[in-house]
């Protein structure tokens, strides 16, 4: 949680209390401050902390809590505002979905009581729990799903919680549901990206290193057998071992160098692809030629999809085609940016080949940005991978980036760290 957001909530806390004598403009400003502060968060934990703190501020309550239910009758998260860490620890373990907490989760509608202790559904609380009187509970909903609830207690102003407090916190809960859903999607997206990159790295290590190490082991065993029977052949095998080990080291170095994500903003899409081509071409002892014309700027997701597809297609060509030359072309065609990666290697029969992880990954990347991927190949006739990605919608202020020209040393060094 940023200091700026904490300052916004603190200013709201120090301002007029909604539901009291504040006018509509003051209430609107107060709500606006806390909604904006919550919506800036991308971590689920930060969003939850901001929600419970903001709810306490908006309701003018001494205490506030936020519960996120799990599937086992308890709470995956239960955050409290208004108690010290020692006071929370003294209360004991997290509550269960019973009593009025369970009622709110089951019924999914606001609950406002003058004294919680007089309600027959009240189950009591641990001895170290503060003594609560008036309470206000509001569900956090995403359509029919209840994501959790906001629970405010002990209004600081006389008279207890009002109908206006209930409307205000309910309005805030609707915004909180959007922020919480967005944060969960953001974290899930990051988790999927990590899994994809782990899979890609495992594939890189297998294709680039594992196979060569297997050959090193086989040749070393052959040399051990030949050392007495045919010393000359044994020396040749050992020379081959040294050569293969050197190649494996170079390819592993390329994988390690590529772990840093590409700085597409600094190097540009064409420049970053060119930088990666220089790196991987040197590693495999092949020519990777990049021909890029002037293209409009894409938004970050589309740029990354094009870059990662180029990376995957180039790597596949160098590892599997047997071609010593790979051509990469980047250009605009009507309302799309087109990437083509082609080689003149051994090719393959697409209909007779099961889709590997690399091909599936490229197709998923294309689909994720509304693009189209096609693969043209035939035995003995080489392979061409073509990705067409639509430009961003008109009116977004896209600027044209230059795709040609030599890459500076600094940009090349940055772009060379193209794999992640």
Image: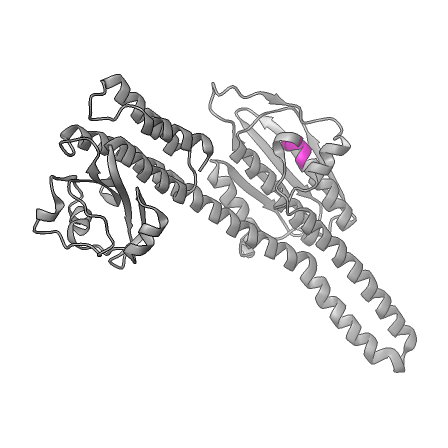
**Span colored in magenta:** 267-272
Instruction: Estimate the x, y position of residue 233 in percent, counting from the top left.
Output: 88, 73
User: Which residue occupies 51% across, 42% down?
Assistant: 365
- Furthest-right residue in view? 232
Q: Nearer the viewer, residue 191 or 102?
A: 102
Instruction: Estimate the x, y position of residue 230 in percent, counting from the top left.
Output: 90, 78
- Furthest-bottom residue in view? 229
The colouring scheme, among rainbow, by chain, secondary structure or one colour, is one colour
Instruction: Estimate the x, y position of residue 6 in percent, counting from the top left.
Output: 41, 33
Instruction: Estimate the x, y position of residue 266 in percent, counting from the top left.
Output: 65, 30
Decide if residue 172 is in sight here.
Answer: yes
Q: Nearer the viewer, residue 262 or 226?
A: 262
Quadrant position of residue 399: top right
User: Which residue occupies 18% across, 33% down?
Assistant: 166
Decide if residue 142 is in sight here.
Answer: no
Q: Count the marks: how many?
A: 0
- Is 66 situated left or right of 262 in this image? left
Q: Nearer the viewer, residue 128 or 302?
A: 128
Q: Is residue 391 above or below residue 124?
A: above
Q: Main secondary structure of the magenta part?
A: helix
* Residue 196 within the magenta-colored segment of the rendering: no
Q: Is residue 116 above or below residue 97?
A: above
User: Which residue occupies 32% across, 34% down?
Assistant: 54
- Is 84 situated left or right of 229 in this image? left
Q: Is residue 318 above or below residue 158?
A: below
Quadrant position of residue 144: top left
């Amino acid at each position: 949680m940023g200091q700026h957001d904490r300052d916004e909530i603190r200013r709201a806390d120090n301002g007029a209390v909604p539901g009291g004598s504040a006018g509509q403009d003051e209430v609107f400003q107060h709500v606006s401050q806390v909604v904006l502060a919550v919506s800036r968060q991308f971590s689920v934990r930060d969003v939850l902390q901001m929600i419970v703190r903001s709810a306490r501020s908006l309701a003018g309550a001494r205490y506030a809590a936020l519960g996120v239910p799990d599937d086992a009758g308890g709470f995956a998260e239960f955050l409290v505002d208004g108690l010290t860490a020692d006071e929370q620890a003294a209360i004991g373990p997290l509550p269960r979905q019973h009593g009025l907490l369970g009622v709110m989760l089951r019924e999914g509608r606001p609950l406002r009581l003058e004294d919680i202790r007089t309600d027959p559904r009240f189950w009591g609380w641990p001895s170290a729990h503060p003594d609560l009187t008036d309470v206000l509970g509001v569900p956090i909903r995403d359509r029919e799903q209840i994501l959790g609830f906001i629970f405010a207690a002990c209004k600081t102003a006389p008279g207890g919680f009002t109908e206006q407090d209930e409307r205000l916190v309910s309005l805030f809960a609707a915004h909180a549901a959007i922020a919480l859903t967005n944060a969960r999607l953001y974290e899930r997206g990051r988790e999927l990206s990590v899994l994809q990159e782990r899979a890609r790295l495992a594939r890189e290590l297998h294709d680039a290193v594992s196979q060569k190490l297997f050959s090193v082991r086989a040749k070393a065993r052959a040399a051990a057998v030949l050392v007495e029977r045919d010393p000359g052949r044994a020396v040749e095998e050992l020379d081959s071992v040294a050569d293969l080990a050197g190649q494996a080291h170079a390819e592993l170095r390329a994988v390690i160098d590529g772990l840093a994500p590409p700085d597409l903003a600094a190097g540009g899409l064409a420049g970053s692809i060119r930088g990666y081509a220089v790196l991987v071409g040197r590693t495999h002892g092949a020519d990777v030629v990049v021909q890029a014309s002037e293209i409009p700027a894409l938004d970050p997701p589309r740029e990354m999809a094009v870059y990662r597809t180029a990376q995957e297609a180039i790597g596949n060509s160098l590892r599997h085609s047997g071609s010593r030359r790979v051509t990469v072309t980047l250009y605009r065609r009507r309302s799309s940016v087109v990437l083509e990666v082609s080689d003149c290697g051994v090719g393959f029969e697409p209909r007779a080949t099961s889709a590997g992880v690399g091909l599936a990954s490229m197709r998923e990347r294309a689909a994720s940005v509304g693009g189209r991927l096609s693969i043209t190949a035939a035995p003995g006739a080489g392979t061409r991978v073509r990705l067409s990605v639509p430009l961003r919608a008109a009116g977004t202020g896209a600027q044209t980036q230059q795709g040609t020209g030599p890459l500076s040393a600094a940009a090349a060094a940055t772009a060379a760290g193209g794999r992640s």
